[in-house]
Image (cartoon, rainbow, N blue to C red):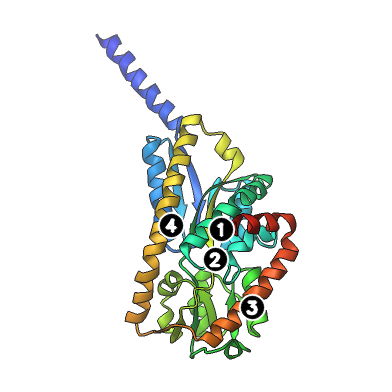
Amino acid sequence: MHISRTLIAAAVALTGLALQVRAETWDMPTPYPDATFHTVNINQFAADVAAATGGALQIKVHSAGSLFKHPEISKAVRSGQVPIGEFFLSLLANDNPAFGVDSLPFLATSYDEAARLWAAQKGVIEKLLDEQGMMVLYAVPWPPQGLYTNKEINSVADLAGLKFRTYNATLEEFANLAGAAPTQVEVPDIPQAFSTGRVEAMITSPSTGVNSKAWDFVSHYTDIQAWIPKNVVVVNKRAFQRLDAATQAAVLEAAAAAETRGWEMSKAETAKQTEVLKENGMIVVQPSEELMKGLREIGARMLENWKAAAGEAGAAILAAYQQ
């Protein structure tokens, strides 16, 4: 009996050791704070993966740029420093203009249009990221982008000379065409950039406006619904291929659920966070016809510039989107 118990204890210990060996933790850098709906969605994605794999794969989320700063996240995943990460898709527009099509002003301004654009863009993006050793897991849009300023903006001319917050090449081009002065500022640095006078205006979502407490440094929110950009969650291909088939399937299933859930969260976020801006004293206004006319003209110029730079890949995306 004593030997039997010893053998059982040894077997249990070996089983526990085997489970420990098989268990894996993936560090996942993300750019945005925990309260941002994208991060909330990612935390749920991580919980779903852990549940579906019985804890064999744990995804540890490092939010708010705490592990890697936003512009470094794609490079960290590509190089294998981390197996998985989230970033703003159009940050890679310098690599290829196809990455930036969802940030072109007034090309896709409703969620239905944004969904059609992603369907048209996805195959091209998957191929480009595959060449960099990465795989798309899912993408989730931000709410339509609005204009934050310290004064009423009735025309594009009112933007002239303002220090304008940018975060990618597309927005830098927009600021230049509007006669503003582009200044690169990441989300966590927005409040300080405004308080120190580094920037005086920005285009971003109601979500980022609320998370940054925009009412502390600007007075007006003009609901121009300029574009609906996306965040993308990607995985290093080698890291994914090292997983067994069942774990791979669990990750893909959780990713599909996260994409569906994230789009619905984004839609709900738009109305909710615009209301929060109002509640905190911001003046929320609809844009004048003159302002929209000028902004659409800038958008049309940017689209032509983008088409010239994007070549066949860009033409394929636009053809699929405009069908």
Looking at the rendered image, the disc whose residue lies closer to the viewer, 4 or 1, is 1
Callout 2 touching callout 3 (CB < 8 Å)? no
Callout 1 touching callout 2 (CB < 8 Å)? yes
The residue that mark 3 highlights is 298
Q: Residues within 10 Å of mark 2 (few under 14, many from 20)?
A: many
Q: Residues within 10 Å of mark 1 (few under 14, many from 20)?
A: many
Looking at the rendered image, the disc whose residue lies closer to the viewer, 2 or 4, is 2
The residue that mark 2 highlights is 108
Callout 3 touching callout 4 (CB < 8 Å)? no
In the displayed structure, 213 sits above or below 76; it is: below
The residue that mark 4 highlights is 263
| Lower position in the chain sequence, tag 2 or tag 4 | 2
In the displayed structure, 116 sits above or below 269; it is: above
Could you tell me which secondary element the residue under label 3 belongs to? Answer: helix
- For the question of whether residue 277 can be seen, the reply is yes
Give the left or right position of residue 90, taking residue 259 as reference: right
Give the left or right position of residue 2, taking residue 78 as reference: left
Could you tell me which secondary element the residue under label 4 belongs to? Answer: helix
Give the left or right position of residue 103, taking residue 248 as reference: right
The residue that mark 1 highlights is 117
Q: Amino acid at mark 3?
A: Ile
- Quadrant containing the N terminus is top left
